Amino acid sequence: MNRIGLEGTGPKIRWRCIVSFLVVALIVLSGSSVSRAQATSGTLLAYEPFGKSGNTPFALNGAGGGGDKGWASDWVEQSGSTAVPGYNIASATALTYTGLFTTTHYATGGYAYQSTGRALNISAGGPFASYLSNGLIGAPGQSIWFSFLLRQDAIGATPNVGLSAQGSDTAWRTNPANIQLGYFGSNSNDSSGNAWWSLQYSGGTVKTSVPVVKDQAVLFVVEDTFGSNGAADQINLYVNPTSLGGSAPATPTLQYSPSGSTAFQSITYYGGDSSNQSSLGDIRIGTSYAVVTPRPTGPSVPTVLAATAGIVVLILIVIWVVAARRRVVRYSN
């Protein structure tokens, strides 16, 4: 038997297999560091996943915590109502959007033609410190990004989400007038009665090209640039963008320059005149388009499981190497 041939091919086979095993081991071991949402450039300043623990549905008024960040206080409902159904946190029909990392819980409403809202943390040392001007988020020349999912759950319902200069117990108020996004009834309809998602400021409504479809979640992404040196604020609005987790699309769905300030400190939500008319999910505020439109990744692998799998793979490598060496020696002899 040709000893040279066997000794020449054995090591090649052995190292090829070893490399393969090492690749598998690295993949398994790296699984423990995979997060549920893809890392993106920029800083997430505030997030509301409506993740407070409890048996849903439960009242939105007074809710907070559960993975949120960047807020000064809990949700407040206009009349302080905790009626269920009313403004609730629910989980039965989660809001989803293709390519976006979303969560199971969401807010639903409304209640007696009333609004609800939540104040952001605008303390001097808080996440919005570099954006503050006169006690509000609105430093001249700065741009901030804001995104959320909104869904109409009942025909004719007029849900909308807005920015408010009010805070604390009046975080639900939209006065003075500020940017609001959603559906505003006849103001959002065309001459044929078709409904379109819209932007509203101080009573003026601008329709987008995206129709309102019952039971279909829509993704709103807003870039708010605060004017400087006498220039007006600038709103770039993206509705149902297909490119997520990176640079913003080259062309916004619409651009708008309001007649007054868009400085804010709270997020408002009008869900409708009665319960179960609309749903709101995954509110994000950040420094970039990428960070408020994070893409999902695979589920994380528990560290213990990954480590155990890695050890098993390494043991298999050792066993294979020993067996291969014995085969080479035996055939050579």
Image (cartoon, grey):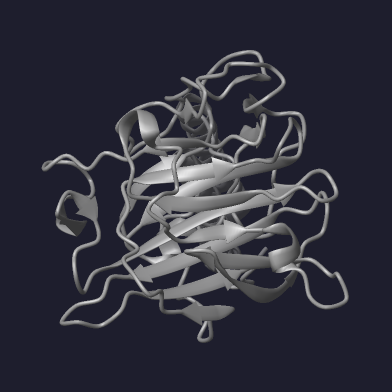
Q: As rendered, which of 4 and 162 lies closer to the eye?
A: 162
Give the residue at x 31% y 47%.
265
Look at 72% across and 53% down and name the residue there.
Answer: 217
Does residue 266 appear in the picture of this structure? yes
Residue 274 lies in what quarter of the image?
A: top right
The x, y position of residue 144, in whole percent, is 33, 63
Residue 319 point in image, percent of width and height: 54, 36
User: Relative to residue 97, is residue 113 depicted above or below?
Assistant: above
Q: Is residue 85 left or right of residue 260?
A: right
Could you tell me which residue is drawn at 43 percent across and 73 percent down?
235
**Residue 302: image x %, image y %?**
51, 29
Quarter residue 211 falls in = bottom right
Residue 96's x, y, as percent?
A: 69, 49
* Left or right of 161 in this view: 74: left
Lateral position of residue 5 relative to residue 139, left or right: right
Q: Please say whether residue 326 is visible from this viewpoint.
A: no
Placement of 40 over or under 141, stated as above or below = above
